């Protein structure tokens, strides 16, 4: 009997992930190989397809964690601003205005620290999304190459759509 894998095993139990420590070694290795490799035959094209999907799978797990972290940090900023604003009292017994409370919340060192973590998380999310996009586009590229090789080299036609044009360069 196989061990059950739950979504919490993939997403983690902490609300804020240590996203700067995500291991991208395999991703960089795969993307580097894809960048420097041309498919030489059908088996090689299918292997490269699998590699790009492997990279996309790893990245999708990291993206789930980073989205969770970004949403948590956005919520934490709002609640921290509200708490600091509510707790603010003007010095020297001066009347505390709503604007003073608002500015106190927005200029709080706690809010600034969380904002910096949020900015890092958002930047990390963009990097992960771009790498995911590259992996998926690579997968589709090698899929097209494999289909072209099947039609031209092996004489296999796509029975679902026999009129489909052979990808350019594989005629």
Image: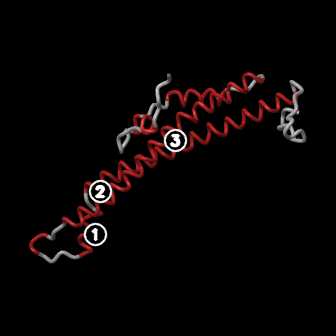
User: With respect to residue 126, does 18 lie above or below?
Assistant: above
Near-viewer residue (107 or 140): 140
The residue pinned by badge 2 equals: 111
Q: Label 1, secondary structure: give it.
A: helix
Query: Upstream in the sequence, badge 3 or badge 2?
Result: 2
Answer whether labels 3 and 2 touch (C-beta < 8 Å).
no
Residue 68 is left or right of residue 163, and the answer is: left
**Disc 3 residue crowd, few under 14, some 14–19, many 20+, Cα 10 Å:** some
Outermost left residue: 92
- Percent across and percent down for residue 30 are 59, 28
The residue pinned by badge 3 equals: 128
Answer whether labels 1 and 3 touch (C-beta < 8 Å).
no
- Disc number for residue 102: 1
Near-viewer residue (133 or 32): 133
Near-viewer residue (41 or 163): 163
**Disc 2 residue crowd, few under 14, some 14–19, many 20+, Cα 10 Å:** many
User: With respect to residue 169, does 101 lie above or below?
Assistant: below
């Amino acid at each position: 009997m196989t061990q059950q894998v739950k979504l919490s095993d993939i997403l983690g139990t902490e609300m804020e992930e240590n996203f700067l420590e995500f291991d991208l070694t395999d991703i960089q290795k795969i993307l580097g190989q894809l960048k420097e490799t041309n498919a030489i035959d059908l088996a090689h094209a299918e292997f490269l397809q699998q590699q790009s999907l492997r990279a996309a799978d790893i990245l999708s797990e990291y993206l789930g964690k980073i989205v969770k972290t970004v949403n948590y940090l956005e919520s934490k900023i709002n609640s921290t601003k509200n708490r600091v604003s509510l707790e603010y009292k003007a010095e020297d017994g001066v009347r505390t205005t709503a604007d003073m409370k608002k500015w106190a919340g927005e200029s709080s060192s706690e809010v600034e620290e969380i904002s910096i973590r949020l900015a890092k998380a958002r930047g990390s999310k963009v990097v992960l999304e771009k790498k995911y996009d590259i992996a998926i586009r690579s997968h589709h590229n090698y899929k097209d190459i494999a289909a072209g090789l099947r039609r031209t080299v092996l004489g296999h036609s796509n029975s679902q759509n026999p009129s489909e044009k052979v990808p350019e360069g594989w005629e």
